[in-house]
Amino acid sequence: MQKLWHQITEQLIPLFRRRLSGVDALPQLAVLGLLSGLITGGVILVFRLAIEWPLEHFLPGDGSESFEELDLLTRGLLPLTGALILGFMLHRLATQDRKVGIVHVMERLNYHQGYIPFRSAVVQFVAGVATVVTGQSAGREGPAVHLGAAFSSLMGQWMRLPNNSIRTLVACGCAAAISASFNTPISGVIFAMEVVMMEYTIAGFTPIILQR
């Protein structure tokens, strides 16, 4: 196993990286799109499980969205307590670490070549779970897009891929997250191309549509 891992990291990944720098890198980008889809799918699965498991066990009634069946006092205290905890947590963080959501992904894509730090993904995961579980006025879709984009970007950073490939991976992660959250794969592709990348190219479109 150690020999196989050494071969992958020392031979296959550098070869893959060199192929990506060429003009005919569409097959390699397609592979990246598929890998991004698998990673994003796993991350979104864990994220949804972290939300639905406590809600299904502690909310009255069936399902994970029956907040209206809580008594009046709990219905008021739960979001208030959640807001205080989130406010304290975010206040303790540095300003650059508080930025989460789709707008932050677009900022990292436009000004930082799609490089999203791991710390940002952790903050988004914890804040997203706490927000939904405590009944705040926000959904799970924005955090899901951030998480999909972040872990796809981290994969590209770990492989030390070129900047254009990391940008494509971020778009792939966004599209996969939208597809997983709404069960609308075509909408995920359109969102990634028009809102995130803001351009239509064959090199960008192929890996994004493959990961869905």
Image: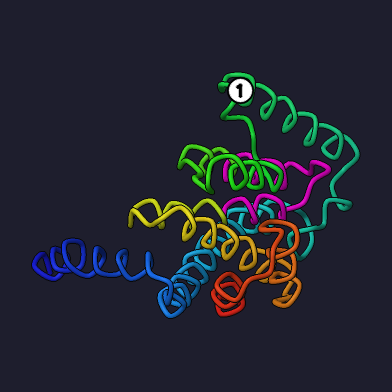
Q: Is residue 210 above or below residue 50?
A: below
Residue 86, position as x, y percentages in the image: 67, 30
At a point 58% along the width and 60% down the height, the residue shown is 49
Q: Main secondary structure of the magenta part?
A: helix
Q: Is residue 73 above or below residue 68?
A: above
At a point 71% along the width and 58% down the height, the residue shown is 198
Quadrant in the picture for residue 48: bottom right
Residue sitting nearer the eye, 52 or 209: 209
Kind of element beneath mark 1: helix
Q: Determine whether, in the image, residue 114 is placed left or right of residue 135.
A: left
What residue does disc 1 label? Answer: 95
Q: Determine whether, in the image, residue 5 is placed left or right of residue 62.
A: left
Quarter of the image where the C terminus is located: bottom right
Q: Determine whether, in the image, residue 117 is placed left or right of residue 76.
A: left
Residue range of the region highlighted in magenta in the rendering: 125-148
Single out the residue that lies furthest toward the left: 3
